[in-house]
Image: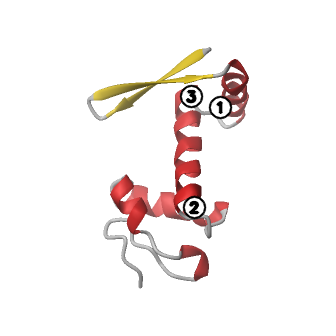
Amino acid sequence: MFHIYFVLGKQMGIVKISEDMHENLRVASDALSRSINAQAEHWMRIGMLAELHPELNHSDICRLLIRAELAGGLDVKQLCAVGDVGQGAVVHATSGGKQ
């Protein structure tokens, strides 16, 4: 069993993961030039968005993350306010509104 440590603002979180998942993270992080923690956080963001918005494909999720980063970051409140990106709506990460 491995532990992944995340720094969340001023707090640190610990997540226990299996050895198999740690190996998957190690391989993916090496291939994509990320730290293991950065790779785990990336997969968690993608997974969280996929669960909250099953209508979005991977490309839509990546565009949403890029827009959110440009707007100052992404939080759960914004994720829950996101509309139907997969059906042609433009999402603004700061307000969650559609245009």
Q: Amino acid at mark 1?
A: Ser
Q: Position of residue 40 (x, y in %)?
A: 57, 34
* Separation of marks 1 and 2 at Cα, in angstroms: 19 Å
Q: Amino acid at mark 2?
A: Ile
Q: Position of residue 88 (x, y in %)?
A: 57, 83
| Quarter of the rendering containing residue 31 | top right
Q: Which residue is mark 2?
A: 61
Q: Which residue is mark 1?
A: 29
Work out whether 46 lies above or below 94.
Answer: above
Q: Which residue is mark 3?
A: 35
Q: Dividing the image into 4 quarters, which one contains the C terminus?
A: bottom left
Q: Are marks 1 and 3 in contact (CB under 8 Å)?
A: yes
Count of numbered marks: 3
* Separation of marks 1 and 3 at Cα, in angstroms: 6 Å
Circle on res. 8: none
**Residue lying at 60% horizontally and 66% vertically, measured from the top left:** 60
What crowding class fits label 1: few (fewer than 14 Cα within 10 Å), some (14-19), or many (20 or more)?
some
Residue 20 horizontal side relative to residue 67, left or right: right
Q: Earlier in the sequence, mark 1 or mark 3?
A: 1
Tag 2, which secondary structure?
helix
**Residue lying at 53% horizontally and 51% vertically, measured from the top left:** 48
Q: Earlier in the sequence, mark 1 or mark 2?
A: 1
Q: Amino acid at mark 3?
A: Ser
Q: Are marks 2 and 3 in contact (CB under 8 Å)?
A: no
What crowding class fits label 3: few (fewer than 14 Cα within 10 Å), some (14-19), or many (20 or more)?
some
Q: Position of residue 1 (x, y in %)?
A: 62, 14
Work out whether 95 lies above or below 31.
Answer: below
Q: Earlier in the sequence, mark 2 or mark 3?
A: 3
Residue 79 horizontal side relative to residue 86, left or right: left
